[in-house]
């Protein structure tokens, strides 16, 4: 049997092989897909056309309720929150269950976030979604909200695991200093090194949350420092001590939901 150290090294190698690519095991969930070299800012998405239709979804026993689809009409007076789920939903559909962390309570998370008077936007991504391309789609949707008159401070993008990696790219593509971001359980040192190598900078108000026992995630402070002077307006980090590691993402725990709501409201 492989030692714990060797197993962890294998998991990390798989996890960061493509930064946003696709890990297959529960322990290597936080990945994204293609890793195009981004050496310059991509021109912001066009505003003349709005194509927010979803990529065809994989078959699953259930589907995310249409109530969480990108709104057909935009009310500039409302607050909007994007929730980008972890990769296990891509791999298994809905419901999704990890032998280590249990069921990923996707709909329960959406319902809880919606209970704080946010228009929550979320969808089930297809299997092995290219995270970089998907980030462009979310950035385009955020741009549509801005163009419709929604104040940037009333837009929050929350990502969990692979979804957090996507959220980092959304921040980079959007280049807006007032939009809010919460990245949950993503910044393992190897992951941060990849973002820095690719010259991926954070913009806006960015909060990082992870559990102290999570071997697949870590502090984002190095990425925050790397982004200073590029557009990051405010950053903070919360380290939880729940003890379930990456499993905190599978449930709508008050320990991470409450800081998310506070961060989304106070800017």
Image (cartoon, helix red, strand yellow):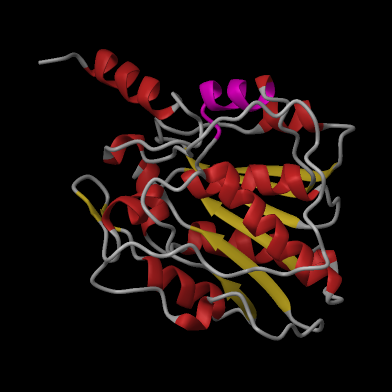
- At 28% from the left and 65% from the top, the residue drawn is 59
249 relative position to 184: left or right: left
Task: Name the residue at the left extreme.
Answer: 1
Image coords of residue 118 (percent x, y)? 64, 77
**141 lies above or below 189:** below
Image coords of residue 84 (percent x, y)? 52, 57
Task: Name the residue at the right extreme.
Answer: 229
- At 65% from the left and 84% from the top, the residue drawn is 72
Quadrant the N terminus occupies: top left
Image coords of residue 73 (percent x, y)? 70, 86
Quadrant the C terminus occupies: bottom right
Image coords of residue 151 (percent x, y)? 85, 70
User: Residue 149 appears in which quarter of the rendering?
Assistant: bottom right
- At 42% from the left and 32% from the top, the residue drawn is 216
Task: Name the residue at the front extreme.
Answer: 49
- At 48% from the left and 39% from the top, the residue drawn is 32
Q: Main secondary structure of the magenta part?
A: helix
**133 lies above or below 2:** below
Residue span colored magenta: 187-196
1 relative position to 23: left or right: left
- Is 96 inside the magenta-drawn segment? no
- Is 191 inside the magenta-drawn segment? yes
235 relative position to 120: left or right: right
User: Would residue 184 be visible to someone looking at this image?
Assistant: no
Say which of 224 and 34 sits in front.
Answer: 34
The image shows a total of numbered marks equal to 0
User: Would residue 219 be visible to someone looking at this image?
Assistant: yes
């Amino acid at each position: 049997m492989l030692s714990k150290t060797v197993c962890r090294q294998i998991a990390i190698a798989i996890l960061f092989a493509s930064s946003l690519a696709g890990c297959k095991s529960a322990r290597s969930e936080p990945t994204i897909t293609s890793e195009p070299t981004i050496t310059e800012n991509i021109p912001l998405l066009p505003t003349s056309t709005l194509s927010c239709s979803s990529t065809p979804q994989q078959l699953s026993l259930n589907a995310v309720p249409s109530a969480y689809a990108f709104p057909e009409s935009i009310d500039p007076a409302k607050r909007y929150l994007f929730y980008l789920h972890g990769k296990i939903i891509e791999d298994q559909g809905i419901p999704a269950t990890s032998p280590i962390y249990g069921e990923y309570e996707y709909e329960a998370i959406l319902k809880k976030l919606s209970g704080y008077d946010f228009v929550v936007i979320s969808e089930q991504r297809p299997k092995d979604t290219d995270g970089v391309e998907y980030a462009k789609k979310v950035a385009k949707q955020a741009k549509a909200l801005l163009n419709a008159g929604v104040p940037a401070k009333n837009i929050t993008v929350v990502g969990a695991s692979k979804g957090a990696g996507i959220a980092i790219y959304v921040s980079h593509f959007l280049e807006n200093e007032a939009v809010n971001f919460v990245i949950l359980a993503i910044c393992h040192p190897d992951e941060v090194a990849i973002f820095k190598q690719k010259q991926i900078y954070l913009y806006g108000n960015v909060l990082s949350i992870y559990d102290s026992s999570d071997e697949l995630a870590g502090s984002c402070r190095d990425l925050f420092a790397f982004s200073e002077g590029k557009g990051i307006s405010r950053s903070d980090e919360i380290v939880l001590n729940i003890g379930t590691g990456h499993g905190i993402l599978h449930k709508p725990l008050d320990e991470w939901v409450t800081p998310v709501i506070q961060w989304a409201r106070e800017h």
